[in-house]
Image (tube, grey):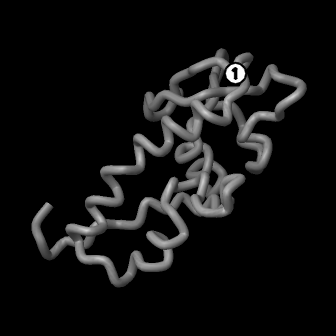
Amino acid sequence: MNDTSPVESPCVKVCVLDATGEMCVGCFRTLDEIGHWARFSNAERAQVIARLPGRRRQAEAASAPAAWAPVRCERCGAGFVCGAKDEDHPCWCSTYPPVKPTGEGASCLCPECLAAAGMR
């Protein structure tokens, strides 16, 4: 990427705040980062993007009940947790519109791929 190419927003159009009300659980940016995104330089945007995977891992580890199993997204291979079998804590994916499985033995999609599939 050259300096003139804008760093694109990581928004996946799943705009839901975490329990603290300070971070989006769709893109893992803080409210301040979302609000200032248009004014950030490419370098500032890149710094935000670099922090997102760690925030995601931390949020998933903190919010996933012990019964939730780590899985890999069938589309992109990203690791995430799935709680579909935990009756006491509905899975995060229950807030998304239903997406038709891609084939026999299909597994879950990560939040980004599920959001993208739901927009088709």
- Report the residue at 49% width, 28% height from top: 79
Q: Is residue 106 above or below residue 115?
A: above
| Residue farthest along the right direction in this orientation | 87
**Percent from the top left, x then y, of residue 4?**
14, 76
Q: Amino acid at mark 1?
A: Trp
**Percent from the top left, x then y, of residue 50?**
31, 51
Q: Is residue 6 above or below residue 87?
A: below
- Report the residue at 58% width, 35% height from top: 60
Q: Nearer the viewer, residue 95 or 106?
A: 95
Left/right of residue 43 with respect to residue 60 in the rendered view: left
Mark 1 falls on what kind of element? loop
Q: Nearer the viewer, residue 95 or 101?
A: 95
Q: Badge 1, how many Cα within 10 Å: few under 14, some, many 20+?
A: some
Residue highlighted by disc 1: 68
**Percent from the top left, x then y, of residue 66?**
70, 18
**Percent from the top left, x then y, of residue 87?**
89, 24
| Residue farthest along the left direction in this orientation | 2
Q: Nearer the viewer, residue 97 or 69?
A: 69
| Quadrant in which residue 23 is drawn | bottom right
